[in-house]
Amino acid sequence: MTIAVDIRRGADERGYYIRTFTNKQFFWSHIESNVYDIRDIAHALAMNCRWTGHTKSFYSVAQHCVYASYEVPAEHAMSALLHDAAEAYMHDTPSPLKWFLREKGFLTFSDLETRIEKVIFETFGVPFPIPDVVKEADQRLLATEHRDLMPQGKENKFMYEPYEWHVQPLSPEQAEKHFLRRYKQLKELRDAKPTHTGR
């Protein structure tokens, strides 16, 4: 398909794109060859509000991911920190909308999200797919956030058990710093591990 070059619409000769915080172009048709920068991911997730913005106060995807990284075994902490990293490029789309689109046969959005997740995990040296222990922590965080930040409704009857601690929302600037600090910590721990070679 030929794409008409129109910078006003975010399109050039390579295809449709968005421009990132670090001034990179992210092309939807070049998922595998895009440059994924942890600074872009941290900043975008910190500016991205969970629950489609319907929380009692601002609460970012970045903070959610940092929480998740502390609620899983150490070997899965980086996976938990990056489990929503695709949302730095696709925004935090509510799960019920994803399920609705899937039921209606619109699979492109979910497929694209999975492709981006996979490439991000590969870029940062994290095994893919996301392990079940991370998915369970994500569900428990969902219940915790619902209890602390959302109007109460009947859907909480079907949620996991929330954590005992309570969410303390951070500003976007604080959340971004916490995310980058946690990433640096986990990367240093991983890089410090000795590599074993066979004889």
Image (spheres, rainbow, N blue to C red):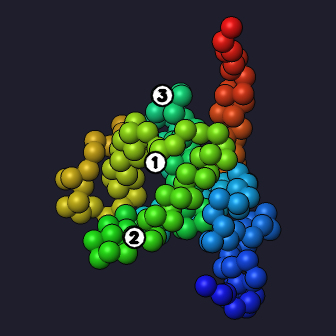
Q: Could you tell me which residue is drawn at 68 percent across and 8 percent down? A: 199
Of 71 and 123, nearer the camera is 123
Alpha-carbon neighbours of circle 2 within 10 Å: few (<14), some, or many (≥20)?
A: few
- SS assignment at label 3: loop
Residue type, mark 3 in image:
Pro
Q: Could you tell me which residue is drawn at 69 percent across and 19 percent down? A: 195
Q: Pick out the residue farthest to the right.
A: 23
Q: CA distance from mark 3 to mark 2?
A: 32 Å
* Residue wearing tag 1: 167
Which numbered disc covers residue 73?
3
Name the front one of labels 3 and 2. Answer: 2
Residue type, mark 1 in image:
Val
* Residue wearing tag 2: 107
Name the front one of labels 1 and 2. Answer: 2
Q: Could you tell me which residue is drawn at 71 percent across and 38 percent down? A: 184
Q: CA distance from mark 1 to mark 2?
A: 33 Å
Of 45 and 78, nearer the camera is 78
